[in-house]
Image (tube, rainbow, N blue to C red):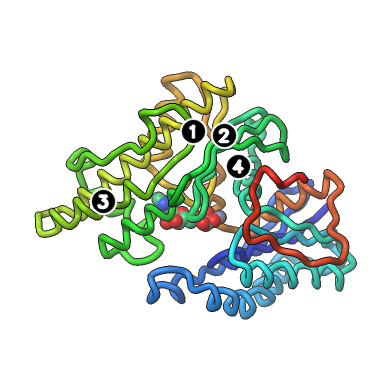
């Protein structure tokens, strides 16, 4: 089986070809970051229009480079949610139309399930059960996975997602959008213990997160210290360390609660190097294992959607002709 994957839930247009036997054949990504940067965040209408402009040319380019004709494609998988409604509709209607024209099946994919399953691509070490930490611009989820497609929510954010907190703090420091990678880079030259930021919701039991207080703490400290030498780098490093500590405390707690010995981390913030390094060290110390998708498949991409589509196809999925999207779609409802 060979699947074309299409991702258009936010500000990246991603396409990929995944083959059941040979794995990922190729993928293409077009980022709209430059388009949204002047506005300091994603402008939904501009995102939809850019997906319209880029999606078909990207599919064409990928099919040509991989020497594929429509007859070679068994299914088209597309992100149906969660995400921006207009952006999702571009991918879903294009994906469904291509499937119809090519006589292929159509599969609607949950974006966060795509992030989660990306960890399993070319990685036979990762088997169920495991705990998944899904950290992106819109979500911060801890999920118990006893079986693929059966997801039990352990923890969620009560306010800002962790990527959102990175982006807002980066904006505060004048680093532009999206700020996560830029903040992390700046933090390399800062002291992570200069400012004592909170580790939110770690003192009481439970697996939920809250990041808006941490963001406000960064704002207050920045206001008081912005004229001091190296303040921006020190705020960045102290903020990042507070986030990393918080995530690690909750992951450890989730592993203890479930009794599972395996953790997977996916979503854009999963590309954060200090998070990776410190989770690895904790895992080695404490006798559990931690796994990630390849770095380029941590942030939004078409490969994770193609792969998740294949997993769904194996379970018998085929959407038929209706085109639907679900901008708010809890991961736990994916199998219902
Ligand atoms: O998964 P993703 O590409 O898109 C969504 O589904 O949201 O995640 C994007 C988020 C952004 O908030 C971005 O700032 C953050 O991931 N991010 C990072 C890093 N790379 C991306 N945050 C911290 N450190 C990074 N290296
Ligand atoms: Zn994402």
Q: Residue at x 38, y 70 (%)?
A: 40
Return the disc, 2 or 1, that comes first in the chain's sequence: 2
User: In what element is the residue under mark 1?
Assistant: loop
The CA distance from mark 3 to mark 2 is 27 Å
Q: Is residue 68 or residue 236 the one in the foreground?
A: 236
Marks 2 & 1, CB-CB < 8 Å contact: yes
The CA distance from mark 4 to mark 2 is 19 Å
The CA distance from mark 4 to mark 1 is 22 Å
Residue 218: mark? 3
Neighbour tally class for label 1: few under 14, some 14-19, many 20 plus, Cα within 10 Å: many
Return the disc, 4 or 2, that comes first in the chain's sequence: 4
Return the disc, 3 or 2, that comes first in the chain's sequence: 2
Q: Which residue is mark 4?
A: 119
Marks 4 & 3, CB-CB < 8 Å contact: no
Q: Which residue is mark 2?
A: 154
Q: Is residue 130 above or below residue 79?
A: above
Neighbour tally class for label 4: few under 14, some 14-19, many 20 plus, Cα within 10 Å: many
Marks 3 & 2, CB-CB < 8 Å contact: no
Percent position (x, y) of residue 232? Answer: 20, 55
Percent position (x, y) of residue 154? Answer: 57, 34
Q: Which residue is mark 1?
A: 207
Return the disc, 4 or 1, that comes first in the chain's sequence: 4
User: In what element is the residue under mark 2?
Assistant: strand
Percent position (x, y) of residue 118? Answer: 62, 46
């Amino acid at each position: 089986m060979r699947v074309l994957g299409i991702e258009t839930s936010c500000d990246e247009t991603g396409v990929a070809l995944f083959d059941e036997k040979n794995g990922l054949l190729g993928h293409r990504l077009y980022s709209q970051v430059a388009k949204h940067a002047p506005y300091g965040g994603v402008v939904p209408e501009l995102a939809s229009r850019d997906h319209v402009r880029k999606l078909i040319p990207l599919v064409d380019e990928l099919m040509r480079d991989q020497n594929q004709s429509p007859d070679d494609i068994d299914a088209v998988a597309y992100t149906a949610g969660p995400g921006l409604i207009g952006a999702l509709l571009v991918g879903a209607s294009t994906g469904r139309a291509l499937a119809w024209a090519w006589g292929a099946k159509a599969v609607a994919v949950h974006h966060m399930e795509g992030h989660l399953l990306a960890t399993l691509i070319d990685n036979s070490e990762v088997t169920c059960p495991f705990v998944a930490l899904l950290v992106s611009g819109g979500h911060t989820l801890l999920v118990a996975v006893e079986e693929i497609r059966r997801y039990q929510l352990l923890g969620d954010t009560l306010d800002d997602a962790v990527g959102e907190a990175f982006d807002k703090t980066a904006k505060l420091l004048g680093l532009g959008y999206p700020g996560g990678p830029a903040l992390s880079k700046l933090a390399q030259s800062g002291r992570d213990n200069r400012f004592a930021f909170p580790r939110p919701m770690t003192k009481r039991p439970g697996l939920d997160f809250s990041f808006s207080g941490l963001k406000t703490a960064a704002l207050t400290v920045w206001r008081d210290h912005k004229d001091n030498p190296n303040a921006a780098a020190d705020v960045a490093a102290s903020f990042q360390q507070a986030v990393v500590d918080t995530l690690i405390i909750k992951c450890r707690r989730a592993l203890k609660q479930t009794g599972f010995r395996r953790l997977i981390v996916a979503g854009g913030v999963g590309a954060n190097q200090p998070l990776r390094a410190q989770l690895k060290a904790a895992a080695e110390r404490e006798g559990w294992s931690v796994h990630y998708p390849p770095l380029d498949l941590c942030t939004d991409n078409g490969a994770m959607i193609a792969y998740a589509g294949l997993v769904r196809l194996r379970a018998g999925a085929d959407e038929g002709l209706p085109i639907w999207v679900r901008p708010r779609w809890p991961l736990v409802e994916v199998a219902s």
